[in-house]
Image (cartoon, rainbow, N blue to C red):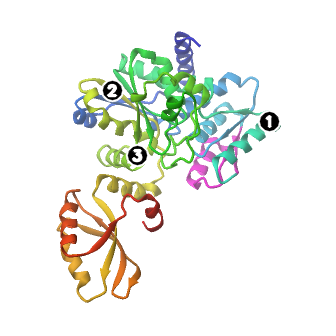
Amino acid sequence: MRASAFADAARAAERDMRAVFPPTPLLRNDHLSERFGADIWLKREDLSPVRSYKLRGAFNAMRKVIAEKDVFVCASAGNHAQGVAFMCRHFGVRGVVFMPVTTPQQKVQKTRMFGADHVDIRLVGDYFDETLAAAQAFCAAEGAHFLSPFDDEDVIEGQASVAVEIEVQLGRYPDRIVLPVGGGGLSAGVRGYFGDAVQYTFVEPTGAQSLGAALDVGRPVDVSPINSFVDGAAVAKLGERTFARLNDVVRQDVLHLSEDRICTTIIEMLNVEGIVLEPAGALAIEALSDLKAEILGKTIVCVASGGNFDFERLPEVKERAQRYSGVKKYFILRMPQRPGALKEFLSILGPDDDIARFEYLKKSARNFGSVLIGIETTRPENFVRFLAELDAAGFTYTDITNDETLAQFVI
Protein backbone atom coordinates (compact mmCIF):
# COMPACT_ATOMS: atom_id res chain seq x y z
CA MET A 1 0.00 0.00 0.00
CA ARG A 2 1.35 3.44 -0.99
CA ALA A 3 2.23 5.78 1.88
CA SER A 4 -0.57 8.21 1.05
CA ALA A 5 -3.12 5.40 0.76
CA PHE A 6 -1.95 3.93 4.06
CA ALA A 7 -2.30 7.33 5.76
CA ASP A 8 -5.82 7.70 4.36
CA ALA A 9 -6.74 4.23 5.61
CA ALA A 10 -5.34 5.01 9.06
CA ARG A 11 -7.40 8.22 9.21
CA ALA A 12 -10.53 6.26 8.24
CA ALA A 13 -9.83 3.71 10.97
CA GLU A 14 -9.29 6.46 13.54
CA ARG A 15 -12.50 8.17 12.48
CA ASP A 16 -14.54 4.99 12.91
CA MET A 17 -12.98 4.33 16.32
CA ARG A 18 -14.58 7.46 17.70
CA ALA A 19 -17.88 5.64 17.88
CA VAL A 20 -16.24 3.21 20.34
CA PHE A 21 -13.78 5.21 22.46
CA PRO A 22 -12.37 8.75 22.59
CA PRO A 23 -8.80 9.64 21.57
CA THR A 24 -6.19 8.97 24.22
CA PRO A 25 -4.64 12.22 25.48
CA LEU A 26 -1.33 13.65 24.29
CA LEU A 27 0.03 15.45 27.35
CA ARG A 28 3.09 17.63 27.74
CA ASN A 29 5.16 16.42 30.68
CA ASP A 30 6.79 19.32 32.51
CA HIS A 31 8.95 17.07 34.68
CA LEU A 32 10.56 15.31 31.72
CA SER A 33 10.72 18.47 29.61
CA GLU A 34 12.70 20.29 32.27
CA ARG A 35 14.92 17.32 32.96
CA PHE A 36 15.93 16.83 29.33
CA GLY A 37 15.74 20.40 28.04
CA ALA A 38 13.19 19.43 25.41
CA ASP A 39 9.47 19.63 24.70
CA ILE A 40 8.42 16.16 25.87
CA TRP A 41 4.92 14.85 25.22
CA LEU A 42 3.45 11.54 26.33
CA LYS A 43 0.90 9.74 24.19
CA ARG A 44 -1.07 8.11 26.98
CA GLU A 45 -2.22 4.76 25.60
CA ASP A 46 -2.39 3.62 29.22
CA LEU A 47 -5.60 5.68 29.39
CA SER A 48 -7.49 3.76 26.70
CA PRO A 49 -10.52 1.72 27.84
CA VAL A 50 -8.30 -1.39 28.14
CA ARG A 51 -5.20 0.54 29.29
CA SER A 52 -3.22 -0.19 26.12
CA TYR A 53 -3.25 0.59 22.39
CA LYS A 54 -4.10 -3.01 21.44
CA LEU A 55 -7.83 -2.43 21.05
CA ARG A 56 -7.07 -0.21 18.02
CA GLY A 57 -5.71 -3.02 15.87
CA ALA A 58 -8.38 -5.42 17.08
CA PHE A 59 -11.12 -2.93 16.17
CA ASN A 60 -9.77 -2.28 12.68
CA ALA A 61 -9.18 -5.93 11.85
CA MET A 62 -12.63 -6.91 13.05
CA ARG A 63 -14.52 -4.13 11.30
CA LYS A 64 -13.03 -5.20 7.97
CA VAL A 65 -14.51 -8.73 8.14
CA ILE A 66 -17.44 -8.36 10.52
CA ALA A 67 -19.95 -8.91 7.70
CA GLU A 68 -18.47 -12.35 6.92
CA LYS A 69 -17.24 -13.59 10.29
CA ASP A 70 -18.96 -13.94 13.65
CA VAL A 71 -16.32 -15.87 15.62
CA PHE A 72 -12.95 -14.31 16.40
CA VAL A 73 -9.98 -16.03 18.01
CA CYS A 74 -6.73 -14.83 19.54
CA ALA A 75 -3.85 -16.23 21.56
CA SER A 76 -2.57 -13.85 24.20
CA ALA A 77 -1.77 -13.58 27.88
CA GLY A 78 -2.10 -9.83 28.08
CA ASN A 79 -3.13 -6.63 26.33
CA HIS A 80 -4.10 -8.17 22.98
CA ALA A 81 -6.53 -10.52 24.72
CA GLN A 82 -8.17 -7.64 26.52
CA GLY A 83 -8.43 -5.56 23.35
CA VAL A 84 -10.03 -8.41 21.44
CA ALA A 85 -12.44 -9.15 24.30
CA PHE A 86 -13.49 -5.48 24.48
CA MET A 87 -14.18 -5.38 20.74
CA CYS A 88 -16.07 -8.67 20.71
CA ARG A 89 -18.48 -7.21 23.22
CA HIS A 90 -18.72 -3.99 21.19
CA PHE A 91 -19.52 -5.76 17.93
CA GLY A 92 -21.73 -8.35 19.64
CA VAL A 93 -19.79 -11.32 18.26
CA ARG A 94 -18.32 -14.43 19.84
CA GLY A 95 -14.67 -14.40 20.85
CA VAL A 96 -12.49 -17.32 21.90
CA VAL A 97 -9.38 -16.24 23.75
CA PHE A 98 -6.64 -18.81 24.27
CA MET A 99 -4.31 -18.07 27.18
CA PRO A 100 -1.47 -20.08 28.71
CA VAL A 101 -2.35 -22.01 31.86
CA THR A 102 0.31 -19.96 33.65
CA THR A 103 -1.45 -16.63 32.95
CA PRO A 104 -1.97 -14.64 36.19
CA GLN A 105 -5.58 -14.69 37.34
CA GLN A 106 -5.68 -10.89 37.29
CA LYS A 107 -5.24 -10.92 33.50
CA VAL A 108 -7.72 -13.72 33.01
CA GLN A 109 -10.33 -11.88 35.07
CA LYS A 110 -9.80 -8.58 33.25
CA THR A 111 -10.19 -10.27 29.88
CA ARG A 112 -13.39 -11.91 31.08
CA MET A 113 -14.63 -8.55 32.41
CA PHE A 114 -14.04 -6.76 29.08
CA GLY A 115 -15.62 -9.53 27.02
CA ALA A 116 -18.47 -10.42 29.39
CA ASP A 117 -20.75 -13.07 27.88
CA HIS A 118 -19.26 -12.68 24.41
CA VAL A 119 -15.89 -14.25 25.23
CA ASP A 120 -14.90 -17.81 26.01
CA ILE A 121 -11.50 -18.07 27.71
CA ARG A 122 -9.54 -21.29 27.23
CA LEU A 123 -6.40 -21.96 29.24
CA VAL A 124 -4.13 -24.18 27.17
CA GLY A 125 -0.43 -24.98 27.45
CA ASP A 126 2.33 -23.93 29.80
CA TYR A 127 4.10 -21.96 27.06
CA PHE A 128 2.79 -19.49 24.49
CA ASP A 129 3.77 -21.64 21.50
CA GLU A 130 1.40 -24.34 22.73
CA THR A 131 -1.33 -21.75 23.27
CA LEU A 132 -0.87 -20.33 19.78
CA ALA A 133 -0.99 -23.77 18.18
CA ALA A 134 -4.25 -24.55 19.98
CA ALA A 135 -5.79 -21.26 18.84
CA GLN A 136 -4.80 -21.81 15.21
CA ALA A 137 -6.06 -25.40 15.28
CA PHE A 138 -9.40 -24.17 16.60
CA CYS A 139 -9.61 -21.60 13.79
CA ALA A 140 -8.93 -24.25 11.16
CA ALA A 141 -11.56 -26.58 12.60
CA GLU A 142 -14.26 -23.97 13.20
CA GLY A 143 -13.63 -21.54 10.34
CA ALA A 144 -13.13 -18.72 12.82
CA HIS A 145 -11.11 -15.58 12.11
CA PHE A 146 -7.70 -15.43 13.79
CA LEU A 147 -6.71 -12.00 15.11
CA SER A 148 -2.94 -11.65 15.12
CA PRO A 149 -1.52 -9.36 17.82
CA PHE A 150 0.73 -7.60 15.27
CA ASP A 151 1.49 -9.47 12.04
CA ASP A 152 -1.59 -8.39 10.10
CA GLU A 153 -2.02 -5.46 7.71
CA ASP A 154 -5.36 -4.44 9.21
CA VAL A 155 -3.90 -4.56 12.74
CA ILE A 156 -0.93 -2.41 11.64
CA GLU A 157 -3.35 0.03 10.02
CA GLY A 158 -5.37 0.20 13.24
CA GLN A 159 -2.29 0.87 15.38
CA ALA A 160 -1.42 3.72 12.99
CA SER A 161 -4.41 5.58 14.45
CA VAL A 162 -2.03 6.49 17.30
CA ALA A 163 -0.08 8.60 14.80
CA VAL A 164 -3.25 10.16 13.39
CA GLU A 165 -4.20 11.37 16.87
CA ILE A 166 -0.68 12.66 17.59
CA GLU A 167 -0.75 14.83 14.46
CA VAL A 168 -4.16 16.27 15.28
CA GLN A 169 -3.47 16.81 18.99
CA LEU A 170 -0.02 18.31 18.56
CA GLY A 171 -1.10 20.39 15.56
CA ARG A 172 2.12 19.50 13.73
CA TYR A 173 4.59 16.68 13.30
CA PRO A 174 6.95 16.09 16.24
CA ASP A 175 10.69 16.09 15.64
CA ARG A 176 11.04 12.57 17.00
CA ILE A 177 8.78 9.75 18.13
CA VAL A 178 10.04 7.19 20.65
CA LEU A 179 8.29 3.82 20.40
CA PRO A 180 8.44 0.52 22.28
CA VAL A 181 8.88 -2.52 20.05
CA GLY A 182 7.60 -6.04 20.57
CA GLY A 183 6.18 -7.68 17.47
CA GLY A 184 6.37 -4.39 15.60
CA GLY A 185 2.70 -3.59 14.95
CA LEU A 186 2.71 -0.19 16.65
CA SER A 187 6.06 0.84 15.18
CA ALA A 188 5.11 -0.28 11.68
CA GLY A 189 1.83 1.60 11.88
CA VAL A 190 3.24 4.88 13.23
CA ARG A 191 6.19 4.85 10.82
CA GLY A 192 3.89 3.95 7.95
CA TYR A 193 1.82 7.06 8.70
CA PHE A 194 4.54 9.65 9.32
CA GLY A 195 7.06 8.19 6.89
CA ASP A 196 10.40 10.03 6.79
CA ALA A 197 8.91 13.31 8.01
CA VAL A 198 10.00 12.61 11.61
CA GLN A 199 12.90 10.86 13.34
CA TYR A 200 12.34 7.65 15.26
CA THR A 201 13.79 5.77 18.17
CA PHE A 202 12.68 2.18 18.60
CA VAL A 203 13.18 0.68 22.06
CA GLU A 204 13.39 -3.01 22.93
CA PRO A 205 14.06 -4.81 26.21
CA THR A 206 17.50 -6.40 26.29
CA GLY A 207 15.95 -9.80 26.86
CA ALA A 208 13.86 -9.73 23.65
CA GLN A 209 15.72 -7.98 20.81
CA SER A 210 13.49 -9.13 17.95
CA LEU A 211 13.80 -5.97 15.80
CA GLY A 212 17.54 -5.60 16.34
CA ALA A 213 18.14 -9.23 15.43
CA ALA A 214 15.94 -8.97 12.32
CA LEU A 215 17.83 -5.91 11.10
CA ASP A 216 21.16 -7.64 11.71
CA VAL A 217 20.37 -10.60 9.45
CA GLY A 218 17.83 -9.03 7.11
CA ARG A 219 14.82 -11.09 8.13
CA PRO A 220 12.77 -11.91 11.24
CA VAL A 221 14.52 -14.52 13.38
CA ASP A 222 13.54 -16.31 16.57
CA VAL A 223 15.56 -14.91 19.49
CA SER A 224 14.34 -17.46 22.03
CA PRO A 225 14.76 -17.88 24.90
CA ILE A 226 13.53 -14.43 25.84
CA ASN A 227 13.13 -12.62 29.13
CA SER A 228 9.37 -12.21 29.65
CA PHE A 229 9.57 -9.52 32.33
CA VAL A 230 8.63 -6.74 29.87
CA ASP A 231 5.66 -8.84 28.82
CA GLY A 232 4.09 -6.21 26.56
CA ALA A 233 7.23 -6.16 24.38
CA ALA A 234 8.71 -9.61 25.02
CA VAL A 235 8.28 -11.14 21.56
CA ALA A 236 10.64 -13.83 20.30
CA LYS A 237 10.18 -13.09 16.59
CA LEU A 238 9.21 -9.91 14.76
CA GLY A 239 6.31 -10.23 12.35
CA GLU A 240 6.95 -10.73 8.63
CA ARG A 241 4.54 -7.94 7.71
CA THR A 242 5.82 -5.58 10.36
CA PHE A 243 9.42 -6.19 9.28
CA ALA A 244 8.48 -5.37 5.69
CA ARG A 245 7.67 -1.88 6.97
CA LEU A 246 10.69 -1.64 9.27
CA ASN A 247 13.45 -3.36 7.27
CA ASP A 248 15.15 -0.08 6.36
CA VAL A 249 15.30 1.26 9.91
CA VAL A 250 18.77 2.55 10.77
CA ARG A 251 20.33 0.14 13.26
CA GLN A 252 21.52 3.02 15.46
CA ASP A 253 17.89 4.07 15.94
CA VAL A 254 17.15 0.85 17.83
CA LEU A 255 17.96 0.92 21.56
CA HIS A 256 18.05 -1.98 23.97
CA LEU A 257 17.33 -1.31 27.64
CA SER A 258 17.84 -3.77 30.47
CA GLU A 259 14.82 -5.02 32.35
CA ASP A 260 16.20 -3.69 35.64
CA ARG A 261 16.79 -0.26 34.16
CA ILE A 262 13.21 -0.01 32.89
CA CYS A 263 12.05 -0.49 36.47
CA THR A 264 13.64 2.80 37.51
CA THR A 265 11.25 4.65 35.19
CA ILE A 266 8.22 2.71 36.42
CA ILE A 267 9.06 3.77 39.97
CA GLU A 268 9.88 7.36 39.00
CA MET A 269 6.69 7.90 37.01
CA LEU A 270 4.63 6.39 39.82
CA ASN A 271 6.26 8.41 42.59
CA VAL A 272 6.75 11.72 40.77
CA GLU A 273 3.85 11.85 38.30
CA GLY A 274 1.35 9.37 39.72
CA ILE A 275 1.35 7.52 36.39
CA VAL A 276 1.00 3.74 36.47
CA LEU A 277 2.91 2.11 33.62
CA GLU A 278 3.57 -1.49 32.77
CA PRO A 279 7.20 -2.32 31.86
CA ALA A 280 6.58 -1.98 28.10
CA GLY A 281 4.81 1.33 28.71
CA ALA A 282 7.94 2.71 30.38
CA LEU A 283 10.36 1.76 27.58
CA ALA A 284 10.03 4.93 25.52
CA ILE A 285 10.37 7.24 28.51
CA GLU A 286 13.47 5.50 29.87
CA ALA A 287 15.11 5.82 26.44
CA LEU A 288 15.19 9.62 26.80
CA SER A 289 18.30 9.30 28.96
CA ASP A 290 20.17 7.82 25.97
CA LEU A 291 18.93 10.56 23.65
CA LYS A 292 19.66 13.61 25.77
CA ALA A 293 22.13 15.23 23.37
CA GLU A 294 19.98 14.55 20.31
CA ILE A 295 16.66 15.84 21.65
CA LEU A 296 17.81 19.10 23.25
CA GLY A 297 15.32 21.81 22.29
CA LYS A 298 13.28 19.41 20.13
CA THR A 299 9.64 18.29 20.28
CA ILE A 300 9.55 14.65 21.30
CA VAL A 301 6.59 12.28 21.63
CA CYS A 302 7.00 9.15 23.75
CA VAL A 303 4.31 6.53 23.35
CA ALA A 304 3.37 5.17 26.78
CA SER A 305 1.97 1.98 25.31
CA GLY A 306 0.20 0.51 28.31
CA GLY A 307 -0.58 0.64 32.00
CA ASN A 308 -1.74 -2.88 32.82
CA PHE A 309 0.44 -3.22 35.86
CA ASP A 310 -0.25 -5.81 38.52
CA PHE A 311 0.69 -4.18 41.82
CA GLU A 312 1.71 -7.57 43.17
CA ARG A 313 4.76 -7.02 40.98
CA LEU A 314 5.68 -3.76 42.69
CA PRO A 315 8.12 -5.29 45.21
CA GLU A 316 9.99 -6.98 42.35
CA VAL A 317 10.03 -3.76 40.31
CA LYS A 318 11.37 -1.79 43.27
CA GLU A 319 14.00 -4.47 43.90
CA ARG A 320 15.16 -4.39 40.29
CA ALA A 321 15.25 -0.59 40.25
CA GLN A 322 17.35 -0.45 43.40
CA ARG A 323 19.81 -3.01 42.09
CA TYR A 324 20.18 -1.17 38.79
CA SER A 325 20.61 2.19 40.55
CA GLY A 326 23.36 0.71 42.72
CA VAL A 327 21.69 1.43 46.06
CA LYS A 328 21.05 -2.22 46.88
CA LYS A 329 23.52 -5.08 46.79
CA TYR A 330 23.61 -8.72 47.83
CA PHE A 331 26.62 -10.56 49.16
CA ILE A 332 27.56 -14.04 50.28
CA LEU A 333 29.61 -13.24 53.38
CA ARG A 334 31.99 -15.66 55.11
CA MET A 335 31.22 -14.96 58.72
CA PRO A 336 33.70 -16.10 61.42
CA GLN A 337 31.99 -18.27 64.03
CA ARG A 338 33.36 -16.42 67.05
CA PRO A 339 31.91 -14.08 69.67
CA GLY A 340 31.81 -10.48 68.49
CA ALA A 341 32.10 -11.21 64.75
CA LEU A 342 28.56 -10.10 63.95
CA LYS A 343 28.95 -6.99 66.10
CA GLU A 344 32.16 -6.17 64.25
CA PHE A 345 30.40 -6.50 60.93
CA LEU A 346 27.47 -4.32 62.03
CA SER A 347 29.88 -1.59 63.13
CA ILE A 348 31.00 -1.24 59.50
CA LEU A 349 27.53 -0.14 58.39
CA GLY A 350 27.17 3.60 57.88
CA PRO A 351 24.30 5.83 59.05
CA ASP A 352 22.54 5.50 55.67
CA ASP A 353 23.03 1.73 55.33
CA ASP A 354 20.35 -0.78 56.20
CA ILE A 355 20.22 -4.57 56.27
CA ALA A 356 17.41 -5.72 53.99
CA ARG A 357 18.20 -9.45 54.14
CA PHE A 358 20.20 -11.57 56.55
CA GLU A 359 20.14 -15.33 56.29
CA TYR A 360 22.58 -18.02 57.36
CA LEU A 361 22.96 -20.42 54.47
CA LYS A 362 25.24 -23.03 55.98
CA LYS A 363 28.43 -23.53 57.92
CA SER A 364 31.15 -23.95 55.32
CA ALA A 365 33.71 -24.95 57.96
CA ARG A 366 33.90 -25.40 61.69
CA ASN A 367 34.95 -21.81 62.23
CA PHE A 368 33.05 -20.05 59.42
CA GLY A 369 29.51 -19.79 58.13
CA SER A 370 28.05 -18.48 54.85
CA VAL A 371 25.58 -15.62 55.17
CA LEU A 372 23.33 -14.15 52.49
CA ILE A 373 23.10 -10.45 53.22
CA GLY A 374 21.31 -7.65 51.41
CA ILE A 375 22.30 -4.04 52.03
CA GLU A 376 20.26 -0.96 51.07
CA THR A 377 21.72 2.52 51.16
CA THR A 378 20.85 6.01 49.93
CA ARG A 379 23.64 6.57 47.41
CA PRO A 380 25.74 4.11 45.35
CA GLU A 381 28.94 5.80 46.58
CA ASN A 382 28.24 4.54 50.10
CA PHE A 383 29.24 1.06 48.99
CA VAL A 384 32.78 2.25 48.18
CA ARG A 385 33.39 3.04 51.86
CA PHE A 386 31.50 -0.02 53.05
CA LEU A 387 33.50 -2.46 50.92
CA ALA A 388 36.79 -0.79 51.77
CA GLU A 389 36.10 -1.22 55.47
CA LEU A 390 34.92 -4.78 54.91
CA ASP A 391 38.25 -5.55 53.21
CA ALA A 392 40.23 -3.81 55.95
CA ALA A 393 38.46 -5.91 58.59
CA GLY A 394 39.44 -9.10 56.76
CA PHE A 395 35.94 -10.28 55.87
CA THR A 396 35.66 -12.55 52.82
CA TYR A 397 32.64 -11.91 50.58
CA THR A 398 31.26 -12.34 47.08
CA ASP A 399 29.03 -9.71 45.42
CA ILE A 400 26.18 -11.65 43.77
CA THR A 401 24.00 -8.64 42.90
CA ASN A 402 24.41 -9.06 39.14
CA ASP A 403 24.73 -12.83 39.09
CA GLU A 404 21.34 -13.59 37.54
CA THR A 405 21.65 -17.37 37.81
CA LEU A 406 22.57 -17.33 41.49
CA ALA A 407 20.11 -14.55 42.27
CA GLN A 408 17.21 -16.66 40.97
CA PHE A 409 17.87 -19.22 43.67
CA VAL A 410 18.83 -17.15 46.71
CA ILE A 411 17.39 -13.62 46.29
Q: Which span of residues is magenta-colored?
A: 95-124
Q: Position of residue 197 (x, y in %)?
A: 40, 15
Q: In which quarter of the image is residue 91?
A: top right
Q: Mark 1 points at which residue?
A: 140
Q: Quadrant of residue 281?
A: top left
92, 304: nearer the viewer: 304
Going from the N terminus, do you reach mark 3 or mark 2 first? 3
User: Left of 281 or right of it: where is 324?
Assistant: left
Residue drawn 36% across the image and 17% down it = 171
Q: Residues within 10 Å of mark 1 (few under 14, many from 20)?
A: few
Q: Give above or below for 95 relative to 12.
A: below
Q: Where is residue 264 in the image (x, y as percent from the top left)?
A: 34, 48
Q: Name the residue under label 3.
A: 258
* Badge 3 vs badge 2, beta-carbon distance below 8 Å: no
User: Left of 340 or right of it: where is 180?
Assistant: right
Q: Nearer the viewer, mark 3 or mark 2?
A: 3
Residue 251 in the magenta stretch? The answer is no
Q: Name the residue under label 2.
A: 300
Q: Give above or below for 245 relative to 100.
A: above
Disc 2 residue type?
Ile
Distance in Å between CA atoms under marks 3 and 2: 22 Å
Q: How crowded is mark 3: few (under 14 residues within 10 Å), some or many (20 or more)?
A: some
321, 381: nearer the viewer: 381
Q: Quick one: quadrant of the N terminus?
A: top right
Q: Is residue 278 visible?
A: no
Residue drawn 66% across the image and 45% down it = 129
Residue 113 in the magenta stretch? The answer is yes
Distance in Å between CA atoms under marks 1 and 3: 39 Å
